[in-house]
Amino acid sequence: MALDAPPLRWMASLLYVAVMLTGLYYVAAGLAPDWSGAELAVFAGGLVALLAVEQLDWRRPRTRHWAGSLLVVRIVLLEIVNSADEAGFSRALFVLVPFFAYLWLGRATGIALAVVYLLAALIRAGTVTGGRTDPEVVSDLFMLFIGLVLVVSTAAVAAEQRRSRLRAERLVTELTATQQRVAELSAASERNRLARDIHDSVGHHLTAVSVQLAKAEAFRERDPEVADRAVADARRATGRALREVRESVGALRAEPFSLAASLFALVDGLHDADFRVVLDVGDEELDQGRAGSEALYRVAQEALTNARRHAGADLVRVAVRRGDDGAVLEVEDNGQGFTPDTAVGGGLSGMRERLAVLGGSVRVESRPGHGTRIVASVPAGTR
């Protein structure tokens, strides 16, 4: 309402003032000898009252009941002014009634009032002697008809503009809410991704450090050389953890990421006499994109950690190959196996969540006493 209210208010107010000044000038010039002082006072007072109605109308929220009440007040005041108007200047103001009715009460009310005023003018002209053939009367009727048509058309345009503005404001509000929701979902997705990275990367290396330190403690008295190697391995695992933290920061900066190189570094850090890892990345260049490469790397990392920490495996085979629609990672160990449907913990669910976001999948094949095989796939071009 705020955009079209001031122009409409000033338009109506200017018309009232113009009619009042014209009437006063007409009297002051001596052109209306039959216009009594009482009639002039009613004429001017009615127009002042209409000005007050306009100010009152725009100062409080508009409801249909309020608009209807003020419309009735306008009609009554216009009739009073017209009855006291010897010169007939106020007749031009009647076109405002259908205009306001159209805007605030709807198209049907506005058009109905326009028709009523036109029929009333025709009836009034028919009661005047010779009115049907008087060129001046016919001209007034024709001008009233044109004025009503123009006013109703203008009101229709104004009403449509208002509806369009309200629709635009609603769409802007909905768009803003949608953008906020997308931002919240993006932030939540990024938090989940970082949580999975921390679990798969730092958690993996902390597990390796824990295993090596436990080994060093166990062999400290029996075989100091083995204990020293375990401490050295723990130190290297700590270094790798720090390096992967830097790589995670690099990922946020869109630095290059090589799946093959990362897997070689991962396997090199885990391989020892008690835990062998055989890696086969093939010779093909796979187009799974950075996001797909990182996802497959995290799956391999989690699978190797589980094989070493929980499965008691001493041999793990890791292979990357081209699939039907992207890249496939296979990790198979000779550990004690488990029942996938009853497994608890965040490792497997983290794998599935990570790949599901990219349109990929994870399949876990295992049963007690027969090792575990994990097959992960991502579609080509996941960025």
Image (cartoon, helix red, strand yellow):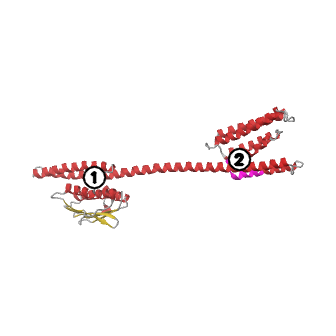
Q: In this view, does 280 lie above or below 31?
A: below
**Relative depth, front residue between 260 and 78:** 260
Residue at 16% across, 49% down: 232
- The type of residue carrying mark 1 is Ser
Q: In which quadrant will I find the N terminus? A: top right
Judged by its main secondary structure, the magenta piece is helix
Q: In this view, does 103 lie to the left or right of 41?
A: left
Image: 130 above or below 303: above
Q: Give the range drawn in magenta.
A: 97-116
Q: How far apart are marks 1 and 2 (CA)?
A: 72 Å
Q: Which residue lies furthest to the bottom in this view?
A: 324
Q: Residue at x 47, y 50 (%)?
A: 179
Q: Name the residue type under label 2.
A: Phe
Left or right of 14 on screen, residue 40: right
Is any atom of residue 45 visible in this view? Answer: no
Left or right relative to 138: residue 50 = left
What is the secondary structure assignment of the residue under circle 1? helix
